[in-house]
Image (spheres, helix red, strand yellow):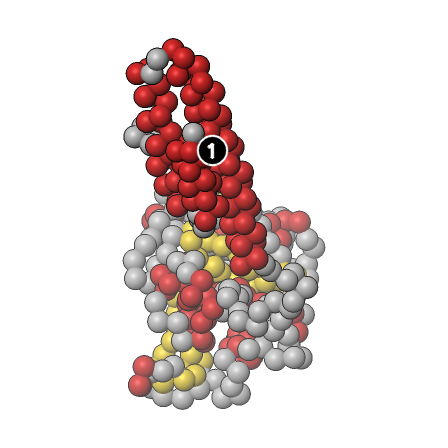
Amino acid sequence: MTDLATLEAQIVGAIGTASDLASLDAVRVSALGKTGSISGLLKGMGALSPDERREQGPLINGLRDRAQAALATRKADLESAALDAQLASEHLDLSLPAPPRRRGGVHPTMQVMDEMIAIFAEMGFAVADGPDIEDDFHNFTALNFPPKHPAREMHDTFFFEANAAGERMLLRTHTSPVQIRTMVSQKPPIRIIAPGRTYRKDSDQTHTPMFHQVEGLVIDRDIHMGHLKWTLETFVGRFFETSDVVTRFRPHHFPFTEPSAELDVQCDRTGGELKVGQGQSWLEVLGCGMVHPNVIRNCGLDPDEWQGFAFGMGVDRLAMLKYGVPDLRDMFASDVRWLSHYGFSAFAAPTAAGGLS
Ligand code: PHE
């Protein structure tokens, strides 16, 4: 009797002083586990005489029941205390202002696209767009690529599986198909730029399979290369934020322009830093030319009445040049640490009046 009372007092005491779930479980094992004190008493009942068993049985069972109940109560208390502690430590005041540390940001490519839109908008260009998934007609044929012309392969096109009619859709290799879509759907005069994603099967240190271009198209009467040159020189000066830009046209070939040229900008690359408007180097910036009469005709317009120029530039590369990004592949790595270094505040959108960068 006294033994049982002492044992119960001991167990209840240990339950009360167990300060966490692990030590409470240790108490449970020592009393009710395989070799626990109460389990030992229960096992010993077999050796008692029937009379003793009748007397001791209810006492031992009662002890076991009370010990189990005390363990359960204590366990519930400890669990709710643990939850309270966790809730208190994770307390978050949602009425506080957001932390000042900027984690993400506007990607340099998007920032530069917004800058380009702001510059060309100031010159009276509207923004047009077209689908990323194009057909052969808009990406090649209407742009005066002859059938089987190597230029089609030159673009390393991603083709989809052919449909029932045997036509293969493709991921547009340049933004030039937007020229076609605009001329077909809109009456001249036309003055648009088309920013967007473009795709080529190309992946190395200086090429990614997806990249960005901004296309430009002007169609009007009596448009000539002088207009093209002025437009591009004005753009380059505004973009690199300097008044003394020196540019040169280098003859080139595109099926959809005639004559065609690439525009280079004079720059200085000494010391690993790029300075536009000085130095001995030339930086290739874009492709351009006078829209080929066949292209104008393919869009249902009369090339004797309407002429124009077009240009197309790689946005990612210009973003790297302007903001000193050393590796193209980082531009597409989706690393938030990189973005917090090179990214721009969403509150600093470029405008012609408010400043570009
Ligand atoms: N589409 C050409 C390219 O991706 C660029 C270009 C556009 C050239 C418009 C001339 C006129 O390389």
Q: Is residue 174 left or right of residue 188?
A: left
Compared with residue 60, is residue 28 higher up or lower down, i.e. above or below?
below
Compared with residue 285, is residue 331 higher up or lower down, i.e. above or below?
above
Neighbours of disc 1 within 10 Å: few (<14), some (14-19), many (20+): many
Q: Which residue is mark 1?
A: 67
Q: Is residue 119 left or right of residue 213?
A: right
Q: Residue at x 66, y 49 (%)?
A: 185
Furthest residue to the top?
50
Return the x and y of residue 243 as percentages of the image width and height.
53, 87
Return the x and y of residue 36 as percentages of the image width and height.
33, 32
Compared with residue 100, is residue 184 higher up or lower down, i.e. above or below?
above
User: In the picture, which quadrant includes the C terminus?
Assistant: bottom right
Query: Which of 316 and 325 lies nearest the eye of the viewer?
Result: 325
Query: Which of 158 and 282 lies nearest the eye of the viewer?
Result: 158
**Label 1 sits on what residue type?**
Ala
Return the x and y of residue 312 as percentages of the image width and height.
49, 63
Q: Residue at x 39, y 72 (%)?
A: 325
Q: Residue at x 42, y 66 (%)?
A: 337
Q: Residue at x 60, y 54 (%)?
A: 129
- Asked whether the viewer can see residue 132, the reply is no
Query: Which of 189 and 139 lies nearest the eye of the viewer?
Result: 139
**Dividing the picture into quarters, in which one does residue 123 lie?**
bottom right
- Asked whether the viewer can see residue 184, the reply is yes
Compared with residue 351, is residue 31 higher up or lower down, i.e. above or below?
above
User: In the picture, which quadrant includes the N terminus?
Assistant: top left
Count numbered badges in the picture.
1
Query: Which of 38 and 265 lies nearest the eye of the viewer?
Result: 38
